[in-house]
Amino acid sequence: MIRRPSPLAQSSGGPEFVFFGALGGLMGGLFSTAGPPLVFQFYRQPLPHRVVRETLVAIFSLNSLFRLGLVAAHGDWQPHTLLWAAAGLPAVLASIYLARRWPPAFSARTPRLAAFVLLVLSGASLVAPVALEFVPVGVK
């Protein structure tokens, strides 16, 4: 994910998509971060970036709906979560409107770099507590 994936000459076959889907599922189950393998795989395809973005949004939306359905079916649904989602909706819609009306003055590379830094920090926060357990007692 550090480097931009180079586009392939032709679309990948089914087994490659199954592999990246399984890798995304594994990472989603272990670290709640299923996106990077899917993003990497889709951006390598010889498709317009708009199609890739729309496909990824659809995949992640369906994944979230499926997860919410499982939570509700298991009986763990908290009614106040809908209230918090509704409370946040105006801020999201206003942000979208403002960003489209007056686009931010930074390059398209900046959000990608910010996402990369956040993913690295997220990974470091998962690894650091475990790594500190292996530090010898007298060194802490």
Image: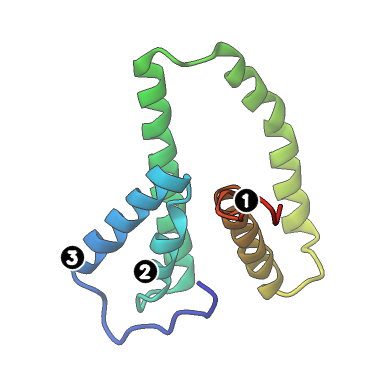
| Mark 3 to mark 2 CA distance (whole Å) | 12 Å
Nearest the eye: 73 or 132: 132
Cβ atoms at labels 2 and 1 below 8 Å apart:
no
- Horizontal side, residue 67 vs residue 126: left or right: left
Q: Secondary structure at mark 3?
A: helix
Residue 108 x/y as whole percent: 67, 73
Looking at the image, tell me whether mark 3 or mark 1 is earlier in sequence order: 3
The residue labelled by disc 1 is: 125
Please tell me whether mark 2 or mark 1 is closer to you in this view.
1
Q: Amino acid at mark 2?
A: Gln
The residue labelled by disc 2 is: 41
- Horizontal side, residue 46 vs residue 123: left or right: left
The residue labelled by disc 3 is: 14
Circle 3 packing at 10 Å, graded few (<14), some (14-19), many (20+), is few
Q: Quadrant of residue 139?
A: bottom right
Q: Secondary structure at mark 2?
A: helix
Circle 1 packing at 10 Å, graded few (<14), some (14-19), many (20+), is few
Residue 86 x/y as whole percent: 65, 24
Q: Residue at x 53, y 80 (%)?
A: 3
